Image (cartoon, coloured by chain):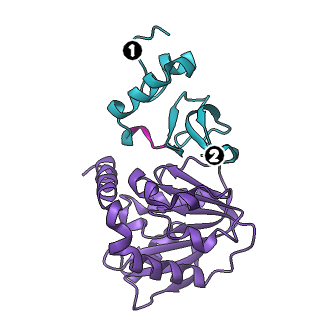
Chain colours: A cyan, B purple
Amino acid sequence: MKRKLMDILACPIDKYHPLELHVFEEGEEIVEGLIICPKCLRWFPIREEIPEMLPDELRNEKDELPFLEKWRGKIPKRILLEGKPFRFTNTKG
Amino acid sequence: MSVWNQKRQHMRYYNNIARFYDEVYGEEQELKIQAAIESLQLPIGSFVLDLGCGTGLLIPKLMRIAECIVCIDMSRTMIERVDLKTRRLENVHMILADADHTPLRQGDFDVIFAITLLQNMPDPNRTLREIRYNAKPEALIVVTGLKKHFSRKDFLKLLKEARLETKSPESDNILNCHVATCTKH
């Protein structure tokens, strides 16, 4: 994902703009990262350069919690505790 | 079947066929794309939204003219089939998203394509409302409707109900779909 895309991205659920970007790995493009809606606290992963911004009903907890786990140390606490649609029930930081 | 189950089913279907999609449907898609863009005077520097972009067949036709091309599809495997060089072009952006819930600001696009999309959406009216939301006031909107899914009359009625004014409803006999170029009322 190119950083420039953030200029036009909005939350797919409440359409809030601007969204927050957290970059975990970057090459020619952002390879892995996280997009957060500061209004509803939904988070959306960027995996293998592609931002995944599906509505809750088309997301799969089993597929996405490992992403939160992988980048746990770099993800804001409020997302780990209160993020939507998935969060850890027990966060030790 | 619920709306979400229909969408999940389509995601699975396209994830499964992505590997051989261009081989099976590429030629048919190229014909639709040709019909869709030949009636357009695409202004240089346009912001283009390609909803249901699939394997990105539309991108090479627009990449030299458009300022920005945003491609959306709900199948990750289809997006992964888009040529990596094309995906990495400075003005091309790929997003895994639902055409009914686009992760985009209101009214940013000059041209919106919805090719081979409406027949896969559980509520085409809902999808057209979202397209209106994404369109600038004077935007051009190109929509196709599979003939076996929509009669010409029903297709035009659908566009009218979505308050889209049809400029050039094409019904080429070679194509298996109707192609309409529209503007917002």
| Foreground of the two, A49 or B95 | A49
Task: Classify B174 as above or below B120.
Answer: below
- Secondary structure mostly seen in magenta is loop
Which class describes the residues within 10 Å of circle 1: few (<14), some (14-19), or many (20+)?
few
Quadrant of residue A56 within the rendered picture: top left
Left or right: A69 in relation to B66? left
Task: Find residue B78 and report its horizontal and vertical position in percent.
Answer: 41, 58
| Foreground of the two, B40 or A67 | A67
Q: Dot 2 corresponds to which residue?
A: A28
Same chain for the residues under marks 2 and 1 in the image: yes
Q: Determine if residue B100 is in view.
A: yes
Q: Determine if residue B185 is in view.
A: no
Q: Which secondary structure lies at badge 1?
A: loop
Left or right: A54 in relation to B19? right
Q: Give the magenta-colored segment's residue range.
A: A52-56
Quadrant of residue A36 within the rendered picture: top right
The residue furthest bottom is B173
Task: Find residue B53 and report its horizontal and vertical position in percent.
Answer: 49, 63
Say whether disc 2 or disc 1 marks the residue closer to the N-terminus. 2
User: Mark 1 falls within which chain?
Assistant: A
The residue furthest left is B1
